[in-house]
Amino acid sequence: MEAVTAVQLTKTYGEVQAVRDLTLHVPQGGVFGLLGAQGAGKTTVIRMLCGLTKPTSGECSVLGCSPAKDPAAVHAVCGVMLASARPYAHMTGQQNLLFFAQAAGMAEKAAERRVSELMKDLELWEERERPVSEYSTGMLQKLSLARALVNYPSVLLLDEPTSGLDYESAHALHALVSQFAAREDTTVLLGTSMMHYAQSICTAYGILEGGELVASGDFQSLREAAGCRAHAEFRLSGGESLEGFRPDETLATGLLEHNGWWRAELRDEEEMPRLLRSIVEHGYDVLEARLVEPTLEDVYKRTLEQHPGKEGTADAHAG
């Protein structure tokens, strides 16, 4: 059974299609990154998966349960972290988590053990008796993650969990998500525009643009489909120029200068030593040489260049 399934899933707000004909299959296990800029449709997809928004057409399910037909069954197996879902400000962090644990059907003692465990793991234990109104943005995000994890979910749906966090806090939160996914055998669907973090924890990806799923797969398959190749980069002694230089081997592109480095796209990584040898044999003094692999950000941008979005397909409804 797949963790998350969507078949021709569509959501329309008036004349705007926030999500259109989305078909998605997320297997159990690992972290799936649903990638897209603001307005791409990530939030709408997650809200439909957890039953907060009904699709205009199409179907979706979480572990075989339909959020439109049986939201209670979905909530029993699913944890959700949405930017719009805030804890109760007048209650303490611990009181919030105990409330949601017992609302999920946990016995009092079991709820207390789980809340203590999560607050310690997320470094909130020392702040457990402070009212949430006094929590910082980072603490609120951690508390929201704890709330999503409190009922031992089999599937965790996260919508921009690091929004508003600084670099260190965002990195720490993503690391915690990855740890919980591995430790508790939880499948994570992570909606994010933060490519750097997504690449560090995700095992597969779906790229959304204008409400459409334009590509999906693991990093290597997306990279190959987008035609993103590795680059060789060289820095020469004395500001020498490689302009017009052509080695014996044929490169995918010529050598171009950028910020003091001469750069060439490679058809495969095996071209790197041959190119370096050719440059040296032609009398150039190479100070530094490096092989630069494409990042998820590179693959994402190239994919969207190949699938230009259509105006008017999404707006603020489709975050």
Image: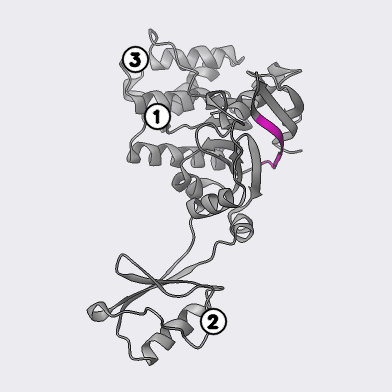
Crowding around mark 2 (Cα neighbors within 10 Å: few <14, some 14 to 19, many 20+) is few
Residue name at image x 57 percent, y 27 percent: 318
Mark 2 or mark 1, earlier in chain: 1
In the image, 158 versus 90, the foreground residue is 158
Residue at image mark 2: 250
Residue at mark 3 to residue at mark 2: CA–CA distance: 67 Å
Residue at image mark 3: 129
Position of residue 214 in the picture relative to residue 142 (left or right): right
- The answer to whether residue 210 is magenta is no
Tell me where the magenta segment starts and ends, as one range: 19-28
The picture places residue 127, in percent across and down from the top left corner, at 32, 21
Amino acid tagged 1? Lys
The residue furthest left is 238
The picture places residue 258, in percent across and down from the top left corner, at 35, 66
Residue 7 position by quadrant: top right
Name the element at disc 2.
loop
